[in-house]
Amino acid sequence: MNRRLFTAAGLALFATASLAAPALADSLDQIKASKTIRIAVDLGSPPFGMNDASMQPTGSDVESAKLLAADLGYKLDLVQVTSPNRVPFLLTGKTDLVMASFSISEERKKVIDFSEPYGVIQIIIAAPKSVTIKDLNDIVGKRVATTRGSTNDKEVTTQAPQADMVRYDDDATLITALISGQVNILASSPQTMAAINARRPQDPLEVKVVVKTNPYAIGIRKGDDALRAVVDEWVKTNLRNGKLNAIYTKYNGVGLPAEMLK
């Protein structure tokens, strides 16, 4: 079956005009035959994927991929991807699955399928305990630090247009600004907050408002229904038994939402 990836404005993964995928046999049959499962991870996206001090892959997605391969009884072949090429690698058969903090979106669902969600990326407002923020109305007129052009920036700017957004070009600069006290209110993720608090123990930030929760899941080619069924059952089992929550908590510093674990 030929598949084509169409350009969708505003999404890096649709940057090319089109991408045709070759005819592919059922992935589950191929995996069984080779006894190897190829799972794509992004090693430039800590804490989900990164290299440790010994330059070995680590992170919550890496450990989750290892658990998936071990539970299914296959050898794991980690395939390194970046955010823009996650979909192309999947469509062209360079990987069987993608586990790379792959947020579910309507645009992506037009060209690939997703498993049941196994994690979340939250957009939060964080500030020191001394700062009272009960909802987004409380940041109106206040200086709020974020990363320029990020989903955090876009979501908070949309919901609280009266906030005084202080935008930094990357997460590293944002973190430095919060550590040095240039700004005391953060619009980012719990992972960024944890990185700040590790270097700001005397006056740590705490989550004040959860602005939005974006679930992420395992990317699967359309038509790979047998593989999807196996992966969905694996996700459900390991959410119920707590293994995926333990991995997520280990790397993210916070647990998964309670409703995901039921």
Image (tube, grey):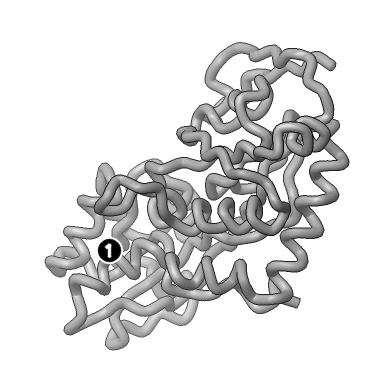
| Rendered image quadrant of residue 188 | bottom left
Residue 57: percent from the left, percent from the top? 40, 48
Task: Give the answer, above or below, for where 132 lies relative to 24.
Answer: below
Residue 189: percent from the left, percent from the top? 42, 62
Crowding around mark 1 (Cα neighbors within 10 Å: few <14, some 14 to 19, many 20+) is some
Spot the residue most to the left: 180
Picture quarter with the C terminus: bottom right
Question: Circle 1 is placed at which residue position?
Answer: 143
Is 77 or 212 nearer to us in this picture? 77
Picture quarter with the N terminus: top right
Is 76 or 9 nearer to us in this picture? 76
Residue 149 lies left or right of residue 128; in this view the side is: right
Please name the residue shown 65% across and 29% down the image. 90
Task: Give the answer, above or below, for where 49 lies relative to 97.
Answer: below
Residue 213: percent from the left, percent from the top? 59, 62
Residue 194 lies left or right of residue 74; in this view the side is: left
Spot the residue most to the bottom: 130
Please name the residue shown 33% across and 55% down the image. 146
Q: Is there any visible trace of residue 167 in the rendered image?
A: no
Residue 120: percent from the left, percent from the top? 58, 61
Q: Secondary structure at mark 1?
A: strand
Q: Is there any visible trace of residue 172 in the rendered image?
A: yes
Type of residue at label 1?
Answer: Arg
Please name the residue shown 27% across and 50% down the image. 54
Is 178 or 42 nearer to us in this picture? 42
